[in-house]
Amino acid sequence: MQSSSTLDLAVNAAKSWLEEINERPVGAIDDLETLRAKLISHLSDEGSSPEEVVNDLVEATKGGLLGSAGGRFFAWVIGGSLPSALAADWLTSTWDQNAALYACGPAASVVEEIAGEWIKELLHLPRQSSFAFTTGCQLAHFTCLAAARAAQLKKVGWNINEDGLFGAPIIRVLTSEHRHASIDRAVRYLGLGNKSLVSIETDSDGRIRPENLKRALSASSAPTILVLNAADLNIAAFDPFEELIPIAKEAGAWVHIDGAFGLFARASKQKFHLTAGLELADSWATDGHKWLNVPFDCGIAIVKDRDAHREAMTISASYIAPENQARDQIDWNPEWSRRARGIPVYAALRELGKDGVADLVDRTSRYCHAIVTEIDKIPGAKMMWEPQLNQGLLRFLDLRPGATEADHDRRTDAVIAEVNASGEAFFSGTTWNGLKAMRVSVVNWRTNDEDVKRTIRAVENVVRELQKTEPEPAC
Ligand SMILES: *Cc1c(COP(=O)(O)O)cnc(C)c1O
């Protein structure tokens, strides 16, 4: 059976990838040119056998894969895949259901219905809320903000579905200066334009102060959407929801939360307090593919006003026969045909249970704290942000006398590049308050004590080597 031997090849390749993930270099080995040379060939007339296709794909991509599914990858915010979630993802592709309608995939519809209810329960969000499993947090923002746009315009007598945006009242979107750029893109997708964005200044802890929100709100009486951070990507700053949301509600604003990874702090008793008051918002966007550790692609949009959400997304067509009792995903999702991406979420939540998710959040946060504070003890390393959750910042100093901030910026970039080149761990950089920093983001279920030790040792070696090769100061 040709099909079965092709799948066997894939299963074996997947298994050896996972078995080797802790031993192979975390960074990619091949450069761009090499990868192109290995992968681009002419599109043949005659095709190839499926076995040949899979074998070649495995060989040609080997050197170009990041070990982000492994335990020593701390760049950006990229989760791994829990065993059940990965297996469920394989099956999702195998079953190949079109999860647009109950009629096209009855089991997929019910699994997603249950997974969505579980997510609301786990994250302590209003139980009447509607939800959608989108490709990622970007499209979850789009979905939630489409509902927000419609609802805010409806309040001033404008029907967005019928009349569109030409001639509509201006909407403004107030957001943190430390927002994720996916908010800007969602606003663009929605036709509101970048000029509708108003950045609100934060304090040095990355949080919006109530006075600043009040000032921004009082600047105009236009229909308003406020977007708050449930963990920004640099330091995991949570805006003070308990103070801010009532002020925004009083002014008639729709409050949306960017909780791509930070929303999962609500699953932990230890971390829940960071998110107090977040349930007062109108909509929440988060990810399955970050802290919940399901494979890409999986975001989740949650909207308190079900009708606003449904009106923004639903469509009827002559060939759609709605099932009265069943959940048709097309009523809530921006896509038409779609993958049943809620199935891996269902699997991950069943595997972990509520306690397991809490433990994942607490454990990875503890590891982040250990990595940042231990590296801080290395001469020349400096903690810029002590992790309160799973994100921290470090800077590396050029120890030559008279070294400037620009020298420290260069040193920080060099440490990141050298650690990544060592293959021992993988980090990414950022700029925080005008200074270069190394970000430490821990979200992978695989990260363990040994990974943490090995990572600290790798950074220590790189810092020591760079100091050894330090040229004498020019003066
Ligand atoms: C990753 C991230 C996003 C974007 O999420 P995608 O799943 O990549 O679309 C938005 N906001 C924050 C804070 C993030 O970390």
Image (tube, helix red, strand yellow):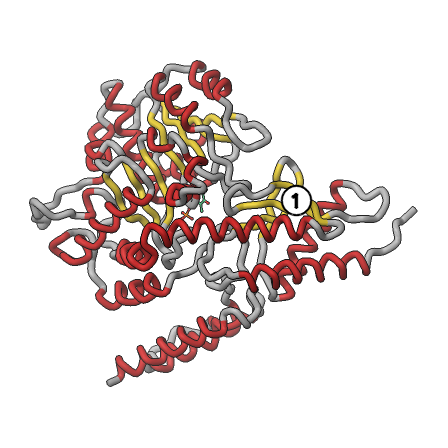
Residue at the image position 42 percent from the left and 35 percent from the top: 275
The extreme right residue here reads 475
* Residue type for callout 1: Met
93 relative to 52, above or below: above
| Image side of residue 399 versus residue 319, left or right | right
Specify whether residue 264 is in view.
yes
Q: Position of residue 230 (x, y in %)?
A: 43, 37
Q: Position of residue 352 (x, y in %)?
A: 34, 56
Task: Classify mark 1: helix, strand or loop.
Answer: strand
Residue at the image position 38 percent from the left and 77 percent from the top: 54
Specify the quarter for ligand 1: top left
Residue at the image position 81 percent from the left and 44 percent from the top: 403
Q: Nearer the viewer, residue 156 or 208?
A: 208
Where residue 458 sits, quadrant-wise, is bottom right
Q: Position of residue 310 (x, y in %)?
A: 20, 37
Residue identifier under label 1: 383
